[in-house]
Amino acid sequence: MDARRSTRTLLAGLATAALLAGSAGAASAADASPGAKPAGDGARALCKRAPKVDQRIDRALKRLDAGKARRGSVARLQQRVDNAKKAGHTEIATFLQGRLDTRESLKKDLEQRKKDLAGVKTWCAKNDGGNKDSAK
């Protein structure tokens, strides 16, 4: 008798779960009605922040391109790697070389972002700072 009761309870639970899943699907379909406004891609906010992002990228690139006297520059880190190799500190040179590789990669990434940001600025100028409705 206990086996039949647990089977009935299991079946009733499954039926309830199926019923709830079906109603949740209908509710989400109702939310996606054609008159609903899309969530947006944040174009307006990006257009507003673009000048500050551009300044930040310029400042970082300026630091990376600076000479050996500037902390954070590629040239200074390269000098440290060379000094460690001359002194025979291979472990230190290996560690610093990893940092140098990362910093050079960062420089390439920032240069690419600068190019991409120029495209964003052009788009923003053509689309009223992201305020135009793209669905028209």
Image (cartoon, rainbow, N blue to C red):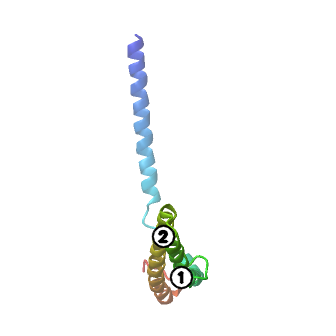
Q: CA distance from mark 2 to mark 1?
A: 27 Å
Q: Please identify the quadrant where the N terminus is shown.
A: top left
Q: Please identify the quadrant where the C terminus is shown.
A: bottom left
In x, y percent, where is residue 39? 50, 67
In x, y percent, where is residue 52? 60, 82
Q: Residue at x 61, y 77 (%)?
A: 71
Q: Residues within 10 Å of mark 1 (few under 14, many from 20)?
A: some
In x, y percent, where is residue 77? 53, 75
Q: Position of 20 compared to 45: left or right?
A: left
Count of numbered circles in the view: 2
In x, y percent, where is residue 32? 44, 60
- Dot 2: what SS? helix
Q: Residue at x 45, y 40 (%)?
A: 20
Q: Position of 40 compared to 69: left or right?
A: left
Residue under numbered circle 1: 61
**Which quadrant of the figure has residue 4?**
top left
State whether residue 36 appears in this view. no
User: Which residue is at the far front?
Assistant: 87
Q: Residues within 10 Å of mark 2 (few under 14, many from 20)?
A: some
Q: Nearer the viewer, residue 50 or 91?
A: 91
Sequence-first disc among 2 and 1: 1
Q: Which mark is residue 99?
A: none
Kindly check if marks 2 and 1 are in contact, taking CB atoms under 8 A apart as contact: no
Q: Amino acid at mark 2?
A: Lys
Q: Amino acid at mark 1?
A: Leu
Q: Residue at x 42, y 19 (%)?
A: 6
Front position among marks 2 and 1: 2
- Dot 1: what SS? helix
Q: Nearer the viewer, residue 38 or 63?
A: 63
Residue under numbered circle 2: 85
Q: Nearer the viewer, residue 23 or 2?
A: 2
Q: Residue at x 53, y 77 (%)?
A: 79
